[in-house]
Image (tube, grey):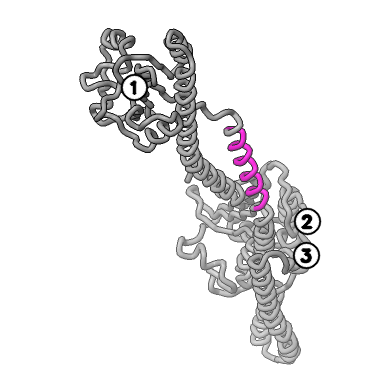
Amino acid sequence: MRLMPKSLAGRLATLLIVTLVVAQVVTFALFSGERVSAFHSAYREDVFFRLVSLVSLLEETPQDLHRRLVATTSAGNFRATLARRPAIGPGQASEPGLRARLAGAMDKPVEAVRVTLSKRPWRGRRGEWRRGDDDRDDDRRTGRRDDDDRRGRPRGPPWVTASIQLESGPWLNATAGPPPVPPLGPAFLASFLASAIAVGAVGALGVRWASKPLKKLADAADRMGRGETFEPLPESGPRETQQANVAFNQMRERIDRFVRDRTAMLAAIAHDLRTPITSLRLRAEFLEDEETKEKVLETLAEMQAMAEAVLAFTRGDAESEETRATDVTALVESLVEDAAAGGRDVTFADSAAVTLKCRPLSLKRAIGNLIDNAGFYGGTARVAVERGGADENEAVRIVIDDDGPGIAEADLERVFDPFVRLEGSRSRETGGAGLGLAIARSIARAHGGDVRLENRDEGGLRAVVSLPG
């Protein structure tokens, strides 16, 4: 499976080519068998007509020319001789159908024709060649034996051995072996390669065309995860693609409606709280006890801050702001400069320029919250922008280190919950409303990234903003 292509088009093209190869191999095996069988059948017909022609010629020519004619016709795998006795004994003849056909074509009785088929040139019982007196001595000198025939392992197509008695008395003994089957020419290989290339190309193009809507759907899902706005997917194409696009558009609409309703509800609650808070502040001004008046006004100020924080948390900046290419390094450096100008001990490490498609105002707000937290709780903060990260999906890492006391391991995730503050006094002098980290993570995740906290080994806290490319 590691050798399989990663794309759907590549995998289907590979599957089609493998299927084609298997089909071609099976077809080649079947075709080769039929081709060899047809070739051998044609060879036997050729031997049949050669025997009929040779016997007719011998019957019509003087006997003193017979041996010369027989020697002339003996060539290649066809050998013929004249002898006083037949090479095939009366009880050794076989192939009655072929005997009757030869006898009928030569106008001879069946007894004058003897035919047998064997996997090797025909021999007698003692392994001697039995084609005639002229060849018997040569065969004895060779001393060859048909071991494969005796062991029951036939080799190659059958040889034809025939003994035909001429009208003048002698026997014509002939043995013919099939010539080798000619190999397949380059046309077969060219046809196979052309078929493989055509099937693979058509398959790859077809799958690429069919999978294009899937790629658009994946891109739309990724953009939706980043909080970007885009046109609904076209609800057209093949039935399966159309159903997937319809389901995706409906899901996106439901999610958008849910987020809008929740945001509108929270914003309405926070906004409506302003009126009673303002009314209470006016009433508190008429209190005569200065100490009670100061405490009431302080509580009202905290409630006002919480209401403003809720409005900021539910503000639809992520939905309304357009995504554009931004120099993240320059953006973070400007935030560090603003924090330093405001009295924070914050430094920026030299970092390479990194351009990223994002919503710069939202990202600026998220990183600004983290820098403010690092400067407020850690005293000193160091900020750096890094290209890439341990995760292949990370294109940019913004690292913010401080020298503060850090956070307990059990609270590293809890502090991202809205209105969670590790300092329990709820005083504005010791911290905000507990929404800074929640806002930062919400914005980062709306970009498809995340924010995480970790305690440094040398002391202090590290905040890491990871953003995909």
Mostly what secondary structure, the magenta segment?
helix
In the image, is residue 57 part of the stretch drawn in magenta? Answer: no
In the image, is residue 195 part of the stretch drawn in magenta? Answer: yes
Magenta-colored span: 189-206
285 left or right, relative to 129: right
Upstream in the sequence, badge 3 or badge 1? 1
Q: Which of 264/59 is in front?
A: 59
154 left or right, relative to 392: left
Q: Where does label 3 land, which residue? A: 321
Where's residue 396, x and y in %?
A: 65, 49
Where's residue 6, x and y in %?
A: 56, 47
Badge 3: residue crowd in 10 Å (few <14, some 14–19, many ≥20)? some
Where's residue 14, x and y in %?
A: 56, 45
Q: Quadrant of residue 189?
A: top right
Disc 3 to disc 2: CB gap under 8 Å: no
As shown in the figure, which amino acid type bears the numbered disc 1? Pro
Rendered view: 408 above or below 334: below
Q: Secondary structure at mark 1?
A: loop
Q: Quadrant of residue 295?
A: bottom right
Report the disc number at residue 324.
Answer: 2
Q: Which of 196/7 is in front?
A: 196
Q: Mark 2 vs mark 1: give the one in front.
A: 1
Report the disc number at residue 121.
Answer: 1
Badge 1: residue crowd in 10 Å (few <14, some 14–19, many ≥20)? some
Rendered view: 170 above or below 323: above
